[in-house]
Amino acid sequence: DTVLTQSPALAVSPGERVSISCRASEGVNSYMHWYQQKPGQQPKLLIYKASNLASGVPARFSGSGSGTDFTLTIDPVEADDTATYFCQQSWNDPRTFGGGTKLELK
Amino acid sequence: EVQLVESGGGLVQPGRSLKLSCAASGFTFSNYYMAWVRQAPKKGLEWVATISTSGSRTYYPDSVKGRFTISRDNAKSSLYLQMNSLKSEDTATYYCARHPGAITTPFDYWGQGVMVTVSS
């Protein structure tokens, strides 16, 4: 299976820029997607195919990368961005998710 | 507005069966691949199954293949997950989700989820 590795947690101050990384154990082309999940809620699609902003998502969110290394960037971070962020690949079988990065605001 | 509403969860003993349902509205259900994704308590997400628009093709990871069956009824705009031979490690919140395209696409809408607890 394709293992997606994310750092477990990050803490930033409002107004700062934050980058959340996702490293794949094998290439996934550009088929990497990012989701935001707030406590008690379902995940929400933010970015699809590495760099495409999903409908209704603020332009503060952006994605980059290809192959095995991907990044979700939030700039500037707002208080409402407190959540866990998951990456997911849809190139290799089975589809897999990263373990999630919990973003906390200082 | 796209809505996905899961039902059918609950407490079930190991080795028993359970069937989940997902009622879809706000879009033409028959035009979309659909999926189930689960999340164990305080854990990450795991893809469980995907079904094609007509239901002729289904996809599973090895962890559930042979025990779980995804199906759909386009006339009723409903998605199902039949879970057999349940194990404690199947305990999770199960989400119904929509693919915007074929199986290589992400999950663009998710339901609120339904809890399944496998325990004696």
Image (spheres, helix red, strand yellow):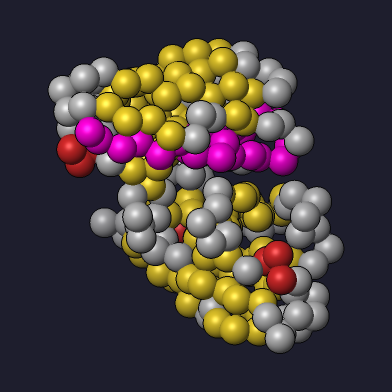
Relative placement, left or right, of A37 versus A61 is right
Q: Residue at x 60, y 76 (%)?
A: B117
Q: Residue at x 77, y 55 (%)?
A: B63
Relative placement, left or right, of A82 versus B109 is left
Relative vertical location of residue A96 with respect to residue B21 in this rendering, above or below? above
The answer to which of B40 and A45 lies nearer the viewer is B40
Of the 4 image quadrants, the one containing the C terminus of chain A is top left
> Does A95 lie within the magenta span?
yes
Residue A29 in sight from this viewpoint: no
What count of labels does the image hold? 0
Residue A68 in sight from this viewpoint: yes
The answer to which of A4 and B107 lies nearer the viewer is A4
Residue A1's spot in the image, x, y percent?
A: 76, 35
Relative vertical location of residue A86 with respect to residue A37 in this rendering, above or below? above
Q: Residue at x 58, y 74 (%)?
A: B116
Residue A95's spot in the image, x, y percent?
A: 65, 40
Relative vertical location of residue B38 with respect to residue B77 in this rendering, above or below? above
Q: Residue at x 68, y 66 (%)?
A: B90
Give the magenta range: A86-106
Relative placement, left or right, of B86 versus B46 is right
Residue B64's spot in the image, x, y percent?
A: 76, 59
